[in-house]
Image: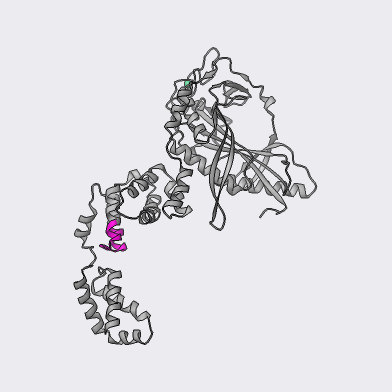
Amino acid sequence: MLNPNYEVVVGLEVHAELNTESKIYCSCKNAFGLEVNSQCCPICMGMPGTLPTLNMQVVEYAIKMGHALHCNIHRICKQDRKNYFYPDLPKSYQISQFDIPLCETGYLDVLVENPDKSSYQKRFGVTRIHIEEDAGKLLHSANIDGSLVDFNRCGVPLIEIVSEPDFRSSAEAHAYLETIKSILQYLDISDCKMEQGSIRADVNVSVRKKGSKEFGTRVEMKNVNSFSAVVRAIDYEAARQIEVLENGGEIFQETRRWDDAKGENVLLRSKEDSQDYRYFPEPDLPTIVLEQEYVDGIKESIPELPNIKLIRFTQDFGISYDEAQVLLEEPEKCAFFEESVAKKVCSPKIICNWMVGDLTKYLREKKLSLGDTALTVDAFTALLKMIEEGKISNAAGKQVFEVLLTQEHADPAKIVEEKGLAQISDDSALQAVVDQVCEANQKSIQDYKNGKTNALGYLTGQCMKATKGKGNPAKMKELLLEYLQTH
Ligand SMILES: [Zn+2]
């Protein structure tokens, strides 16, 4: 728990690798996990005399994200050199965008969950989105004296999404990051595989006395590589700064490295300012000039976004925030839900219950995605319809469901028949069972009439036993009550 006299202020810079076919300035393949230094050429290795050519798919993807975050798109913008030396950067400069980014001044509406599970909607400002190239990767191994460099990642296209310092808790930062990630996935412009580093965040943290309008000195933590680590890094750094201030110390503008295993950060370097990078316009690339029709056309291709779906699902279908989050985890799962609802053969609520419950549990256990299973919308909704109509019990439904997941073209009605799972809902058959059970249990009937209402549960159980679990429990209870009133 942070000192309540202080407020934490956080800004985020998200780097997302775009999943274009080829790299940003050459025709090398943009792919992860291939043989070291097999996907590079003189251009992305920065050989003297080579010339870059901008991959327009990168511009298109960045504009998509710009539209999704309600940004102004600069139809005329340029690219700049950011100069610094590091062994993973063979050119000793990175081509990025400095003063005129492709997208500027947007926002994102996010539903943030409170610790008590209630939620609130908040709008976070997006300062800018620009395009740039990734650097290579240093490989360290205990078997090697020194380090090796893999240049495959040089020239992989990135967008950097810079937020306003609008977050007032680690929970708000987390909700924003999850939303950014799901939007990237819905737009299908990034793989968002955190374990492969395809999405990473730099976190700026400062603290100030509550009620103060001025910002404190901010500290940057670079390349925090999971969203849960971002939460830990923010909480740790805010507590550290408050302690320094409370002890009469001063916060310095610096870059610190977050060590998630140790749960602490260490000073990396005092913070560099933009002038340290000696930015200048990239002389080898022309100004980017885009037609209005082109920019507008990209906007039309954008589907309904997950943050909007989240709000719609909770309002229209009576689904909770947590349930909606599970449905929205993957676009594939969400599409399956919406197609199932559109069939209108069973209620959205039962579809949600089964997808969030049994289906998600199965996929997580087997480490599968929905497309890896044999489940179809038709078979799934037909099964749920049988459950809702009382033709089979919930427990029998689970048995059928297991078959639907693994067997192609399985017909739920056939499985019910083959396995003898149909519930007895026929009134006369159930009436006979009820009469028989009641006659054999006169003592329980007397108990019930003397106010021992749990005798009803016992009688229902006896009826279920007599039908080998196939009696429709709701109908059976109805008939039992009728018997008790009339005898
Ligand atoms: Zn190349």
* Quadrant housing residue 188: top left
Say if the magenta span includes residue 319: no
User: Is there any visible trace of residue 257 in the rendered image?
Assistant: yes
Say if the magenta span includes residue 387: yes
Q: Is residue 416 above or below residue 188?
A: below
Q: Residue at left 34%, top 49%?
A: 341
- Whole-percent x and y of residue 393? 29, 64
Q: Main secondary structure of the magenta part?
A: helix
Q: Residue at left 61%, top 18%?
A: 281
* Quadrant housing residue 395: bottom left
**Looking at this rendering, what residue extends furthest in the right direction?**
248
Q: Is residue 97 above or below residue 251?
A: above
Left or right: 149, with 304 as reference point: right
Q: Residue at left 31%, top 55%?
A: 346
Q: Is residue 432 above or below residue 335?
A: below
- Whole-percent x and y of residue 124? 58, 41
Left or right: 337, with 139 as reference point: left
Q: Is residue 406 above or below residue 416?
A: above
Magenta stretch bounds: 385-399
Quadrant of image for the C terminus: bottom left
- Whole-percent x and y of residue 45? 52, 20
* Quadrant housing residue 126: top right
